[in-house]
Image: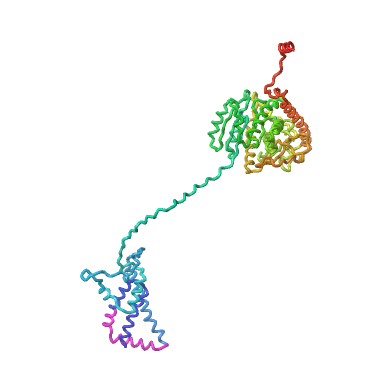
């Protein structure tokens, strides 16, 4: 009985090692167990037997069992800690991450003996003992270990080369993938500038070349350019503009080659400019008689080649040319009042700039609309609408109005012999108007501009059939005429006088057109040079003799 107690107490300490997995610990455990068994047999003496008997006796007592059973339990845990520390210190390798190292030695076949040709299992059987410890050891070996591969044999399997299976040819050919669809081209318009051989036409072409909504720009040379101050050939201008890095294509057409019809083909916007040989100091009748045959020829070509184009008239006098183009298009049956607009961009720009300077404000925040006519005494700038909640005095408004009316002739006189010296500012205003109309035709914007258009009798009751007011433009043209706004007393009086003068001006246009249409007076309407008739006595004598 004492020997059993001694052997059991000596065997309790190593059982803590079973909590740590690993083949290495099991191997050390077997060596440690054999050593303890041998030392236990040698150290059993009478003194140890008496000590064990006293422990058993005290353990039977319920009161003293807790007091004296604590010491052997502490000895067991302290010995387990020593074993754990010693085993951890002996570890000098780490686990490798590979599939071959995850096999246990129990799963690997034993080595083959060279003599008998059979597996040698004697060495492994001597170390293993049947029992609970052997089962636990096999379970740990099969589950793997965290301490490397001390009992594993690394084997590398040769990779099997798989045969490449050639697929059988298909009866039908593989479908060809559809090509990627390109995005639709960016919408843009085509603009034709008639009378682009002047300095104003070149400046306008330069500004329109930079507009992203214009895909093609066509420049046409006017008929009479003998008095033009621009000595540069139009073809040179076009070659120069083509170097600008924009998507707009610029083309030149000449009147010498009769290319007016080809220039107007498929045009969306047609811009009519002055020929450059007309001075603003000339009376309105003389200027109209000079420009009317040229504009009439333009209108006939537009009716044939691009009747649906939006026409912007900048040929002075604008208040005479717009009715002339309307009558010409009515004769051909292609008149659309929504596609005909007289430009008031230049006087509006001058009026807004002058009002901004008078108020010490930026011109961006000031806008002065113009109504009734386009130049001279028929032009009425509404300075009362320049700024909200602010009105100019009557004296100041009258002075500003007179300055705007005489601005064109004042600029021409300030530069000496130059017939037209305001090309830069006029080009900026005209190009801005063309850009607004282009974006409106593309349905990208609904701008509100001032233009000389045909009046609606339901909105404005006046003797003049054409009048300047604010309009709204969309893809179909002018959709709404806003009419005359609320005005001051001075502006009302100016509008009354301007309407009467517009009535007489439009009557002059109608008379010229009737004279042109009559066969007997057609030659007089075609004349483009004005001179005083000289008496031919010999011709009269010959005519009298023939009678």
Task: Give coordinates of residue 381: x percent, y percent.
Answer: 72, 36
Counting the numbered discs, the total is 0
Q: Would you say the magenta stretch is mainly helix, strand or loop?
A: helix
In this view, the residue in front, 412 or 439, is 439
Coloring applied to the structure: rainbow
Q: Quadrant of the C terminus?
A: top right
Q: Is 227 part of what is drawn in magenta? A: no
Is any part of residue 171 visible from this angle?
yes
Image side of residue 352 versus residue 147, left or right: right
Location of residue 32 with respect to 211 vertically, above or below: below
What is the span of residues highlighted in magenta in the rendered image? 36-62
Residue drawn at x 28%, y 87% as measured from the top left? 46
Question: Residue 451 location in percent, x, y?
Answer: 70, 37
Q: Nearest the camera: 372 or 526?
A: 526
Is residue 404 in sight in this rendering?
no
Q: Position of residue 530 (x, y in %)?
A: 69, 21
Q: Pick whichever, 476 or 8, lies toward us.
A: 476
Name the quadrant of the N terminus. Answer: bottom left
**Residue 129 vertical placement versus 545 (above, below):** below
Left or right: residue 518 versus residue 268 is: right
Query: In the rendering, at what x and y percent does residue 401 appear?
Result: 73, 33
């Amino acid at each position: 009985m004492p020997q059993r107690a001694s052997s059991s107490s000596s065997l309790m300490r190593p059982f803590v090692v079973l909590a740590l997995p690993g083949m290495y610990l099991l191997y050390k455990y077997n060596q440690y167990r054999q050593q303890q068994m041998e030392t236990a047999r040698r150290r059993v003496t009478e003194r140890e037997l008496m000590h064990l008997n006293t422990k058993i006796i005290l353990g039977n007592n319920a009161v003293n069992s807790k007091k004296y059973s604590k010491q052997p339990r502490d000895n067991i845990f302290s010995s387990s800690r020593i074993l754990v520390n010693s085993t951890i210190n002996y570890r000098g390798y780490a686990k490798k991450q590979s599939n071959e190292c995850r096999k246990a030695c129990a799963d690997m076949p034993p080595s083959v003996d060279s003599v008998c040709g059979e597996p040698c299992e004697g060495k492994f059987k001597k170390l293993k003992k049947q029992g609970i410890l052997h089962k636990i050891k096999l379970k740990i070996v099969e589950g793997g270990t965290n301490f490397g591969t001390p009992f594993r044999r690394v084997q590398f399997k040769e990779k099997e080369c798989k045969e490449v299976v050639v697929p059988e040819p298909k009866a039908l050919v593989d479908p060809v993938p559809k090509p990627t669809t390109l995005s639709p081209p960016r919408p843009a318009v085509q603009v034709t500038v008639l009378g682009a051989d002047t300095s104003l036409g070149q400046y306008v072409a330069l500004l329109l070349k930079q507009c992203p909504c214009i895909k093609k720009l066509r420049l046409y040379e006017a008929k009479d350019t003998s008095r033009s101050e621009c000595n540069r050939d139009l073809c040179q201008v076009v070659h120069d503009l083509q170097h600008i890095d924009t998507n707009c294509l610029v083309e030149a057409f000449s009147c010498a080659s009769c290319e007016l019809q080809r220039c107007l083909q498929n045009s969306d916007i047609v811009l009519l400019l002055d020929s450059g040989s007309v001075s603003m100091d000339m009376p309105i009748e003389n200027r109209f008689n000079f420009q009317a045959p040229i504009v009439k020829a333009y209108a006939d070509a537009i009716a044939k080649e691009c009747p649906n184009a939006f026409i912007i008239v900048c040929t002075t006098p604008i208040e005479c040319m717009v009715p002339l183009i309307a009558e010409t298009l009515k004769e051909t049956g292609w008149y659309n009042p929504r596609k005909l607009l007289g430009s008031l961009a230049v006087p509006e720009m001058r009026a807004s700039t002058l009002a901004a300077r008078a108020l010490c404000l930026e011109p961006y925040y000031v806008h002065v609309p113009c109504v009734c006519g386009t130049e001279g005494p028929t032009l009425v700038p509404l300075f009362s609408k320049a700024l909200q909640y602010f009105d100019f005095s009557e004296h100041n408004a009258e002075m500003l109005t007179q300055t705007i009316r005489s601005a064109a002739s004042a600029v021409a006189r300030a530069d000496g012999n130059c017939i037209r010296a305001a090309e830069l500012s006029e080009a900026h205003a005209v190009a801005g108007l063309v850009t607004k109309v282009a974006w409106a035709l593309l349905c990208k914007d609904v701008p509100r501009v001032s233009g000389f258009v045909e009046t609606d009798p339901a909105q404005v009751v006046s003797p003049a059939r054409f009048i300047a007011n604010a309009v709204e433009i969309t893809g179909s043209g002018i959709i709404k005429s806003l009419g005359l706004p609320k005005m001051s007393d001075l502006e009302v009086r100016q509008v009354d006088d301007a309407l009467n003068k517009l009535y007489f001006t439009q009557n002059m246009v109608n008379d010229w057109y009737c004279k042109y249409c009559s066969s007997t007076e057609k030659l007089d309407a075609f004349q483009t040079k004005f001179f005083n008739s000289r008496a031919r006595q010999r011709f009269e004598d010959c005519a009298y003799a023939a009678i």
